[in-house]
Amino acid sequence: MPSFWRESPGQLDNHRSTESLPALADILIIGGGFAGASIVTHLLRHPSYQLSRPSTLILEARQVCSGATGRNGGHLKPDSYAGIATLAQRHGVKAAAEVADFESANLAAVTEFIRQEKIDCDFVVTWAVDVQFHEKHQNRLREGYESLVEAGVESTKATFCAPDHYAEQLSGVKGAKGMFSYTAGHIWPYKLIHHLFQEAILQGVNLQTNTPAISISRNNREDFLWSVDTPRGKVQAKKVILATNAYTSSLLPEYVDKIIPYRGTVAHIKTPGVPPFLPNTYSLRFSDWDFDYLIPRPDGSIIVGGGRQAYLKDMSQWYGNTDDSKPIDRTREYFDGYMQKHFHGWEDSGAYVSDIWTGIMGYSSDRLPRVGPIPNRQDMYIMAGFTGHGMPQVFLCAKGIAKMVLEGGSFKETGLPALFEESQERLDNPRNMVHEIHHAASSCAKL
Ligand SMILES: Cc1cc2nc3c(=O)[nH]c(=O)nc-3n(C[C@H](O)[C@H](O)[C@H](O)COP(=O)(O)OP(=O)(O)OC[C@H]3O[C@@H](n4cnc5c(N)ncnc54)[C@H](O)[C@@H]3O)c2cc1C
């Protein structure tokens, strides 16, 4: 089904740079979303690419930016304290701080890139306002926040925790019991990705849309190690990069239950007249597993994602579900009257759901992105599993991938957060934290 962002697709939507599929590629990227587009962008900017000019091919199963990136909320919101505090508990403050600072560096890098390239993609830098509805939840988040501030984590220090008794007045959200605010961005994702591919094609990169990779096998040759089958023929490649998000396990069996397709929903809310002014982006948190996020468009309409309480208990609606052809049951009803219910000043706005769509996220079983060389697969790399939170992570992860692919260096040398590195240990870990979300929802654990 279409999404708001894909209502007027660009000229590259069904692009094929050459009529037939090239038989050989030095670098093959599979996936044409934010990950694929960012990887090719950073490859092209790497000095050794410009010297050696490797042939680069991108395979996209459907249209350009038709996966999660073309269906998301467009919220570029670096986490600075919430998930980060959980990471600190689990992996230590140093590792968590790396992730927090990396995410805010991503926002800065995307901002700078868009400014320099003058990309028309409705990009806005603003404040994110996170609201909790339960005191206990707020207290727990504040504790985590304070310990990160105490440890000196820079991006947490740049986050404001409002006095609880002002949360409702400062946020404008009815019944708010606590509030944090910090810098975030929002964007028209399709326009950015389309621009990145346009630039890449101008520089000689071959993009083949509507060309799914069906399988990957090892060649007997020493140079072109990998052979990728598609319905349009076979490509042999020296290096393969999987930017296949939720669909990774259809190509590599080791990713079954490691990157899990997770169907999510986003709606577009409009008003018949001039909407009440909403200056920030918002997250409304009802519990750890149950939250919505809102992004005001420059025209005052609202993009809102989440709605988990409408469907999360029914696992078949989301877990392992890749059907983005129809809305998730009960979500339209959930978002009907949403602004009137939650925001002061919207009661008489007449706000209504003008559009609703689904998209498929790639949830990692340990809830961390998977980036780097794939164990036991020489010259094959992964950049996927962004767990519904790729917008403040993908761009600079791609810079790291480009460095590894072109320089042959190690993950460590990229400076990417250590927790993101793909490893055999992570692949062998039987824990499935995505199941745990369902258990929390089923037991209605509020906090
Ligand atoms: C409903 C929804 C709301 C979201 N909201 C936000 C948000 O507000 N903020 C945020 O940070 N993140 C959000 N996310 C997550 C974010 O969109 C993703 O983390 C990010 O877009 C991932 O980019 P990607 O390129 O890895 O994946 P995708 O955009 O899914 O791209 C992967 C591409 O690979 C292609 N592909 C897969 N397998 C093959 C194959 N075998 N052959 C060829 N091509 C293949 C797919 O067709 C797809 O186009 C949301 C996601 C969804 C679904």
Image (cartoon, rainbow, N blue to C red):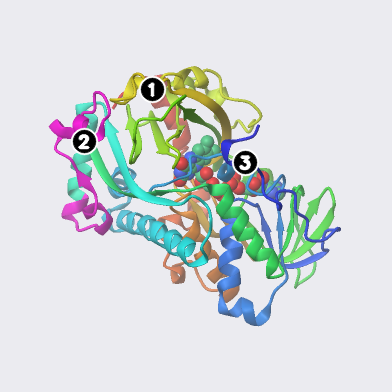
Whether residue 18 is situated above or below residue 62 in the rendered picture = below
Who's the residue at 53% across and 55% down the image?
120
Earlier sequence position, callout 1 versus callout 3? 3
Question: Quick one: 413 or 283, which is closer to the camera?
Answer: 283
Label 1: few (<14), some or many (≥20) within 10 Å?
some
- Secondary structure, mark 3, is helix
Question: Quick one: 32 or 346, which is closer to the camera?
Answer: 346
Q: Disc 1 to disc 3, how far (Cα)?
A: 27 Å
Q: Nearer the viewer, mark 1 or mark 3?
A: 1
Relative horizontal placement of residue 276, taking residue 269 as reference (left or right): left
Q: Amino acid at mark 2?
A: Leu
Q: Position of residue 358 (x, y in %)?
A: 57, 31
Q: Nearer the viewer, mark 1 or mark 2?
A: 1
Magenta range is: 148-177
Who's the residue at 58% across and 62% down the image?
39
- Secondary structure, mark 1, is loop
Earlier sequence position, callout 2 versus callout 3? 3
The residue tagged 2 is 170
Q: Disc 1 to disc 2, how far (Cα)?
A: 20 Å
The residue tagged 1 is 349
Whether residue 298 is situated above or below residue 93 in the rendered picture = above
- The mark found on residue 140 in the picture is none
Relative horizontal placement of residue 12, taking residue 406 as reference (left or right): right
Q: Ligand 1 closer than 8 Å to the CB at disc 1?
A: no
Q: Does the rendering let one see residue 445? A: no
Q: Position of residue 70 (x, y in %)?
A: 59, 43
Q: Amino acid at mark 3?
A: Arg
Q: Amino acid at mark 1?
A: Ser
Q: Does the rendering let one see residue 277? A: yes
* Residue 173 belongs to magenta span: yes
The residue tagged 3 is 6
